[in-house]
Image (cartoon, rainbow, N blue to C red):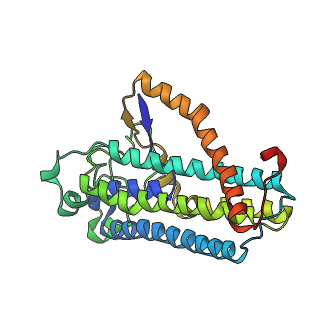
Amino acid sequence: MAELTVPESLYGMALAEPLALNLKHDGCLIFIIEFIRTYCMLALNYVIQGLFLYEIAQVVQDHYGDGCTDEHLYLQLMCVFVFEVSIFHEFRNSCDLFCLLWHAPSSKYEQANKHAYDRILGLGANVGNSPGGAILADEAGSTGRFGKAFRTFRPPAHPDIKPWTLRGFSRLYKVWSTLIIAVPKLALDLLLAMYGSEYIAKSGDREAMIQNTLAVNFVLQVDRILYQAFTSEHTKASLSHMDPVIREVSNRVRFMTWAMNTVVYPLIVLTGTFAIVFYSKYRECDSYSAPIFFS
């Protein structure tokens, strides 16, 4: 068996928290605010990463032909390789997110008892598993209509409380999550891989090359920074303890996975590093010839 887990990041929160929100237990005010906040944070992440990507692309254009020298070729290859490893890790995370959305169990049961917003978006997948909603716990007694929106916040997770789950994941919500979360993340990863590598390769000196490597890796961390800064500890705990999606795998799949991770993936990243660095040199530099030991 293989476990597909929800990522502990802004993308994972945008996928899981709307499913756990419960209008009855969380209250109307918290339900609306948290629902809007989740997608606004996701949009903010896209805007920030998109602007960084645009500026990086502009710098790459401004430095056309600056990577022709082989004075710091070893450092150039090393920095691009480190970045490509980071971006390949993000690319695999994007693929895992697609796989999670594909294999997450969709179900039509309990649909008749759900409210309209539940039936449309597939919300409330957490119903029956954890007493309460995404933010507030179920408390004995009634607090009235006004006080319902301001109940005591959920205490730390108790061992007896079942975690959030993707059970009851509707197909419509799968499509929505794929288009809003998985596809944009993959697109940003691919674009950053293309422009970020050239940005590093065209750095003027050793210091700038090292700093630019750290800079483009920082762009990859924007979603985690926003998630860690603006997400409550209780929500982080609930997300980290979510039930994984179990997928049956054969020994053939296990062997192929081992071979890909041990041999194929490292070769892809290594080949991509050399291709990016030298393709840029041959494309932009007249009469460029590779060093003898690369010929």
Farthest residue in the top direction?
A: 251
Res 227 visible: no
Task: Report if residue 209 is visible in the image.
Answer: yes
Image quarter for residue 282?
bottom right
Q: With 233 as the anchor, is 77 left or right in this view?
A: right
Count of marks overlaid on the render: 0
> Residue 294: x and y, percent?
78, 46
- Residue located 46% across and 42% down the image: 241
Figure quadrant of the N terminus = top left
Q: Is residue 61 left or right of residue 228?
A: right
Query: Which is nearer the eye, 16 or 81?
Result: 81
Residue ID at (87%, 59%): 71
In the rendered image, residue 235, in percent from the top left (x then y), is placed at 47, 54
Q: Quadrant of residue 129?
A: top left
| Image quadrant in which you'd find residue 116 | bottom left
Q: Is residue 41 left or right of residue 278?
A: left
